[in-house]
Structure formats: structure tokens, C-alpha cells
Image (tube, grey):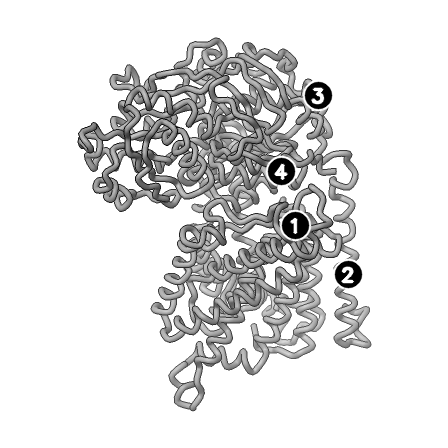
Amino acid sequence: MSLIRKPLNRRSILRAGAMGGAALATPTVFTSSAWSAPYLNEPKGGEVTFGFNVPQTGAYADEGADELRAYQLAVKHINGEGDGGMLNTFSSKALGGNGVNGKKVAYVTGDTQTKSDAARASAKRMIEKDGAIMITGGSSSGVAIAVQSLCQEAGVIFMAGLTHSNDTTGKDRRANGFRHFFNTEMTGAALAPVLKNAFGTDRKAYHLTADYTWGWSQEGSIKKYTEALGWNTVAAVRTPLGAGDFSQYLTPVLNSGADVLVLNHYGKDMVNSLTQAVQFGLREKQVNGKQFEIVVPLFSRLMAQGAGDAIKGIFGSTNWNWSLQDEGSQAFVKSFGQEYGFPPSQAAHTCYAQAILYADACQRAGTFEPCAVAAALEDYEFDGLGNGPTLYRGADHQCFKDVLVVKGKENPSSQFDLLEVVEITPRAQVEYAPDMEDVKGDLGTCNNGA
Amino acid sequence: MATQTSPMRDYIFFAVFAVAVLTMPVWLEPIGAGYPDLLQKFAIFGLFATGFNLLFGLTGYLSFGHAAFLGVGSYTAVWTFKLLGMNPIPAAIMAVIASGLFALAIGYVSLRRSGIYFSILTLAFAQMSYNLAYSVLTPITNGETGLRVLQSDPRLFDGSTESDGPLLSNLFGIEMTGYAGFYFCAVVLLIGFFIAQRIFRSPFGIMLRAVKTNQNRMTYTGLNPRPYTLAAFVISGMYAGLAGALMCITDPLAGAERMQWTASGEIVLMTILGGAGTLLGPIFGAALIKYFENIFSAFNEQTLHEIFGFLPDWIEYPIVSVSSLFVGEGWHLTLGVLFMLIVIFLPGGLMEGIARIRKLFRRKPGKAEPSGAAAPAE
């Protein structure tokens, strides 16, 4: 301060302050790696960092915890620890259990809180601070879409976790985003024939829908396919995410004249709404001379566990279930069980598969450069990851594979054996054109962040 | 702390503050906070807290609904992007105007009551806005999914020139992400801080303090406090709206969860944690909470093992298992403990802590004014 003591006036002080600030700020421009590397977060040294962005709090926390376990297991297997899991059954043999492209895989984690803002902040931290080359995870379509567009802007690959809305690879599809999980369109196509056989073609449906992109998408798909069967939709009511108490939404169902209740809920919401619907005695009711039925289009073993007896006999669809007998599923269940002592959920399975698919694509491309990796994933045919032969379609970055239609088991043999596979709907039956009316979108061009 | 004020000291103080803010990327690097996204959050929430403090710190009116103005600012900014173009300046101006008008409406009603009734009224209005954004206003707000800028939007001024690249806010060619985004937010924070400093020192600020001290006496002397409190409320709402706009400028997405009551509570926490009624306190509080949220929540057992790795295993494992309760998803717990400690032992917030430490050092050299001391924090 002694330098500027003499002509101490406002101007000189402001000038000195501004100049000092500018001078001190300059070096940061050069330390920012985005300026020098040919692509963002190019791994230097012997490690490459993946970013696992999962909900650790909120309505989807159970799924998030299972996803994180699966990611940690996948990293172990990629680095050559453990028994190798599905790497042994995977049709591509590029990964040799010594990391990816000769680099050991490290990871950072973050909490999405099932909120778009928090998820984006956490993804940004991983990209900007921790140097993550790829972001994966998410257990909500709203979050997945928000993080996917962030990754597109930043220039890293996004491997979507559990996200079921059509929009993720439909109207909000992005060149840097990839999804292994199925979507509501496939659920509708797979579930409708089963519902027709079980409940007939003359039914009145009442929807309770989680009020965000996934709920809207699923409501739309189920309406589309059930109305094609001849069902009527009496009403579709939107409920806020994480509502907890659904009784105010269930009371009107009783007097609506509907004989099927479709619960477009997931996670803790579904556990609560289903349990409350059963407590209201909906399943014992006779309406229009027919037995009242409840359908939960998307459910998982974790939710079945939460819902307890309420889930028995309820129809739904799922991406994968641990009871599948193919080689890949068996290998995964075995190594997950050895590590954690219980079988994995569908969320864990899709996240594990995504991590393996990404690592494999990097190995095949010989680089981590996002656009080269994306090219290696596009139109890639593979097998041995638990869903039979699967295609990563290049036109919308969506995986196409068989869909499971399941029912809550009446007599479970263990606390995990809760779902009974009613039908495995073949891939051909759930395929749709990438430019179909409901899912039209624009991928844009791949961004490597350089 | 506000014992000796003079225009000169204020300018020096402001200059030191400006240098500190602009050099944040350098001196926050060692504690792992020197990356653009968190720096942007520091600046944005610092501005938000500064504005909130103009109301709560000066007049003592505790608003529990300030997140609503943040949300209104966010939505206005995104709509400005959608309709006019990606330049941040119109977005910021529109957001300030919209949130100001909104604050005028809410303030006009709520300020008829004071104390707890005022808090509950603002809370009710904020919760109403949140639920409206979620349900009835879905066509405007896009509900839970959040409002985004799409390629198909009209964007009057730059819609035609856009290629298919990512849609980012863009100040005459400089993309408002990364460090550029931070410096934009930092400059806005400095402007906001300067205005707040002027208000603190102005006759208007004295009037606001008078409202806090004794409103009855003020009325007896023939002064109507309502216009002053309403003005403070509107200004404070504008700050919140501007902060909301900045959030969208650095990341063009607006979601309803920004308006939830927890977000309103967070800003109250920030202000109290830092020290209500002081200029710097709320900014410290905002930075502290955002630091916890982003850095502590990312610690997992792996990181803890690295930190405590130098200890022998039989000490390391218990320490890691106990401390892992306080990091990761347990960061709220740490924050809660810290908040309790501060409220119990330092009711004036962090600023009181700093003042006490300064007093300790000042007493030793005697009563003489330490002329050569480093520029004071306040």
C-alpha cells in the first residue's frame, strides 16, 4: 500500500486494484487444460478418470446406491481384479483386464440428489476439477437429460444409467449421449399383448403419473398401446415427484368408474403409491363386473422388495432381472453376489453394462477421444451382457434388445426372488423407426470439447 | 465494526474485496475449490446473499421466500434467451425487472405484517410459486424437467446465425462458461456489492436500520416505515432475480426446484452463518455452504483412506468409518453441526469470529491505531 500512498485518490486505488486483479488472474487462463489438449480432459499419466453421478439422496436413493456398487465392480473388473464378471461372457474380447488403453481406471463420485441443478453441478465438478473423461449414471430421466446436454456442451461422453423416458434418446437425444436401458415405447409394445391376454380388450384405465419427462413419456406410451387394444383412458392425473402420500390422488380413482389403475411411478414413489392403493382395497374391488387391476409399467426388484406383499400378481416390465439363466447374467449375479452378498438390481445391471461398453469402445477405438469412442459405439452389435444380442443404434444412440415382461411372484422362495418373468418379448417386436413421430429428434454433431 | 467509516476506507475496502474476488481461481486452488463451476456458484450465491442481507440484515424482516425471486429471475432469463437471443445482458436486465415487479407484488401484501407473520407469508408465496411452476404453469416452466433453450426457438437477434453447436450464453462472442462465465459473474457481484455498500452508508440505509431498531418510535416521529421496507424488499428481490439470471447465463437451464422452500432456507442459513447485517458475512456464508455442498459431498471412503493413509491401519479404519458419516451424503450433518456451533458460540456469525480474532491481536500493541496493518476486512 505504501506505493500508492501519495496521490491517494479513488481513481488510483481503483486502477491499482483492477490492474492487480487482472495480473493475478492471467495465469489461470493458461492453466486451464482446455486450451492445450486436442480434446477435453485427455488422460495424462497412467490413470483415466470416470465420473459416476448417481442419486445418493432423494426418491431414487436405493437405485443410486446399487448403481454405485455396480460401477465399482465394473472398475475392478476392467482393472483386472476380481473374477472378471461379464467381461468373460461379453462378445468383444478387446479388454484384457489391464485397464483401458494401458491406463488404470480411477473414478470420482457425485450426488445428483435427483435434481437437475445438483446433478449438473456435480457433473461439472467432475469434468472441470477431477478431469473425468466420461460421465455416467443417473436414475431419473429429467436428470439424465439435463446431464446429457451438459456433457454435449462440455465435450465428454455421457453413458446414461437408469433412464426410461423416450426423450433421452428421442427428442432430447445428443451426439455425446448413449443409453443402454430400454424406454417407455418398448415397455408399451411389450406390455400391451400381455395385458390383453390377462385383462381383455374392454377396460377403463386410470393413470397416476409422476409429473416429469419420464412420467409423461410412459403415460403417453401406455395410452397409445392400450388404446390400440380397445381400452379407454378415464383420466390421467399428474402427481409431484417424491410426494410420499398419495391418498388424495387415490380416493378419486374409486369413484371414477375405472377398472385398471396404471401407476406411472418409480422408486420410493411407486412403493408408496402401490402400497397405499392396496391398503385402499382397490385390488379386492369389482368394477363394471370385472376384477379391479393395478399395472406398474416399469418396476424393479428393489421396488418389489420395498412394496412387499403389495407387488404380488402385478404386471410390469423390466430391463433385466437377476433370475435370467443366460451365461452373462449368471456371471454378473455371481460376482456381484460375492462382492456385496445380494443379487444386483436392473439399475446395477444397466450401469455395469454401460461402464463395460464404454471401456470396450475406448479400447477398440484405441483412444479416449469422445468422437472416436462415439463412432466405435454407434451401430455396434454385441452379446453376452445379459440381454441377448443387442444393437447400439447409431441413429439415436439407443440400445435395442429383448424386453422382459414380469409379474410379482405369488410365492417367493427368498427375499430376492420376487419377480416372475412372464414373457421375454423379442427385440424385433419392440423396435421402432428412429424418426417416429413421438421420438423425433436431432443428434447434432459430436463435441470433443477442444 | 462499522465504528469508523469514511469514503476513503470504503474505497480501499472495495478495492481489496475486488482483488480478492477476481483472484479467487488462484487462491482457492489449494483447497480444491478453484474450478469454474464452483467459483461461479460462489459469485452467484454471494450476490444472492448480499441482496438478502439488504433486507434481513438492515430491516430485520426475515423473508423465507427469497428463492421465488431466484426462480422468477431464472425463468425470465431463459425466456429472454429463447425469444431474444443468447446475449446475457438483456437476460439479466429482464430478470431484474421481472423479479422486481414480482417482489413489489409480494412485498406489498406481505409487508403489512412483521415478524413471524411476515416470514410465514413470504414462505407461503414462495411455496405457491413453486407449486404453480410445477403444475399449472407447466407450459411456461416445463415443470420438473426444467426450461431449456432449444434450437427451434425464435431467438430474434441471433436465431439465424446459429449453427448446430451447443446453445450457450454468449457475450459478444465470449462464451459464458468456464472462467469467462466466472469473471462475468464476479463483475456482476462486484457491482452488486458496490451498490450494497453505498446503500449501507446512505441515509436510506440508516432509515432501514431505524426500522430494525425500533419501528414504533419511527412511526411516532412521523415517518412511515412501509415505503422504506418495501423498497428494501424490492431491491433485495432484484438481487435474487439477478442471481437467478446469472445461474442461467452460466448454464441455460431453469428448474422449479430452485424455488423450493429448502432453497429459501439455504439463503437464510448462508446469511446467518456469515453474519447478518455485515457486508462481507453473507458472502462468506454463501461460499462456505457451497464449498461444503460440492467438495464435502464428493468425499467417499476411498478419498478418506487417502487422507488418513499415513496412520497405522488400526487407527485409520475407525477414523475413516466415523468420519465417513460426515462426508459424502452426510455433508448435511457436518453443516448442521457447524451451524449449531456458530449460532451458539458466535451469534454474529463468521464475521463476529473474525472481529474477535482481530480484537485479540489489536489489544497487544496498545490503544494506538495500527496504521501499518494490512487492509482491514471491513
**Amino acid, disc 4:** Cys
**Amino acid, disc 3:** Ala
Distance from disc 4 to disc 3, alpha carbons, whole Å, reads: 20 Å
Label 3: few (<14), some (14–19) or many (≥20) C-alpha neighbours in 10 Å: some
Chain under disc 1: B
Number of the label disc, if any, that sits on residue A204: none
Distance from disc 1 to disc 3, alpha carbons, whole Å, reads: 37 Å
Q: Position of residue A139 (x, y in %)?
A: 47, 34
**Amino acid, disc 1:** Leu
Badge 4 marks a residue whose secondary structure is helix
Nearest to N terminus: mark 2 or mark 4: 2
Residue highlighted by disc 3: A365
- The reply to whether callout 4 and callout 1 are in contact (CB within 8 Å) is no
Foreground mark, 4 or 1, reads: 4
Chain under disc 3: A
At 51% across and 60% down in the image, what residue appears? B72
Label 4: few (<14), some (14–19) or many (≥20) C-alpha neighbours in 10 Å: many
